[in-house]
Amino acid sequence: MQASEQFFEVKVVEKSHRGTGVVFLTLARPDGAALPPFTAGAHIQLRLPDGLLRQYSLCGDPARSDSYRLAILASRRSRGGGSYIRDSLQPGDRVLISAPRNDFPLAERRGPSLLLAGGIGITPLLAMALALKARDREFRLHYLGRPATLSAFAEQPEFRALEQHIALHFPRAAAGESDQRAVLARVLADGQRRHGRFSLYYCGSPAFMQNVRDLCASCAIPAGDCFCESFTPVAVRGEGAFEVEIFSTGEVIPVPADLSIAEALNQAGVEVEISCGLGICGACQAGIKAGLPDHRDEYLSAAEKEANHKIMLCCSRARSARLVIDL
């Protein structure tokens, strides 16, 4: 599959990493020309030297066209993208990125908005908060996470511009998920008391997302008022290896246990568009000519999965030794 998005070159004009696990990058065109515009909630794809494509939300002000701002979690468990950016990428280096794409836009509606950020999930919500502030709309951004992550953001201009609109919560580490759930329950209940109905935007870890979904259901918050984006790609853990054959060329590419199909193809020079990385947007969809897939996406319907004519390359795998796919 040839990616539909066109990549272009940008320069790293600023990099900030204070040992908190979060790396901030400012990217601009080498000639200083304007970058493609973006809307709050958008992301770009960054092509790394080893061929991997990584998706990162834009956390800067959508009103600016001279630069893009990224906040990247580079933990010790990083699968390559974050560790390379942390250890090797330097100011002055040039990288390829895609134009912005938005699968998590602000809804065109009036009334108050509640933004819930779990850890590094604050990234797209910062851009949303800046856009809401520029529109003079009522909103509140709640951050739940580690103080170390928060301290990294607290030094950034986007955060400082929004300080009066941000509420900070640090659930007790010993209590874990249960304490996080209690904090979220209080925040949502307070929002209902104050506003009755509001637009809810949330982003964070899988556990954080599930807590918010469960609480919204129990509080009878209308599903149409809730908008979310997961910030954690589907993990590949101890899977079996298999092969993928490209139907049009006959090329056979091994997919090792620790890579997704999309990652293996990109490393082999077969470019695959990865957008959400979670199996929910359909950008990496391919046809199946032979073999048995192991569907792990949330994009295909049950009937489509049963038919086995399509597969999402970012997250699904194979139950057979080889899959023949149509790109």
Image (tube, rainbow, N blue to C red):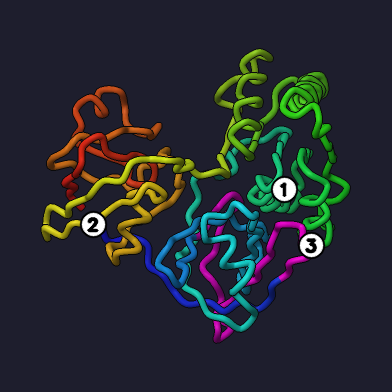
Q: Residues within 10 Å of mark 1 (few under 14, many from 20)?
A: many
Q: Is residue 326 visible?
A: yes
Q: Position of residue 300 (x, y in %)?
A: 32, 32
Q: Is residue 129 above or below residue 49?
A: above
In the displayed structure image, the side of residue 261 where residue 200 appears, left or right? right
Q: Secondary structure at mark 2?
A: strand
Q: Identify which residue, 144 or 30, lies in the foreground.
A: 144
Between the residue at mark 1 and the residue at mark 2, the CA separation in whole angstroms equals 43 Å
Residue 20 part of the magenta segment = yes
Instruction: Read off the residue under disc 2.
Output: 253
- Asked if disc 2 and disc 3 are in contact, CB closer than 8 Å, the reply is no
- In the image shown, does 197 or 67 lie closer to the viewer? 67
What is the x, y in percent for residue 156?
A: 79, 62
Q: Quadrant of the N terminus?
A: bottom left
N-terminal of the pair, mark 1 or mark 3, is: 1
Task: Determine the CA span between mark 1 and mark 3.
Answer: 14 Å
Residue 217: percent from left, percent from top: 61, 16
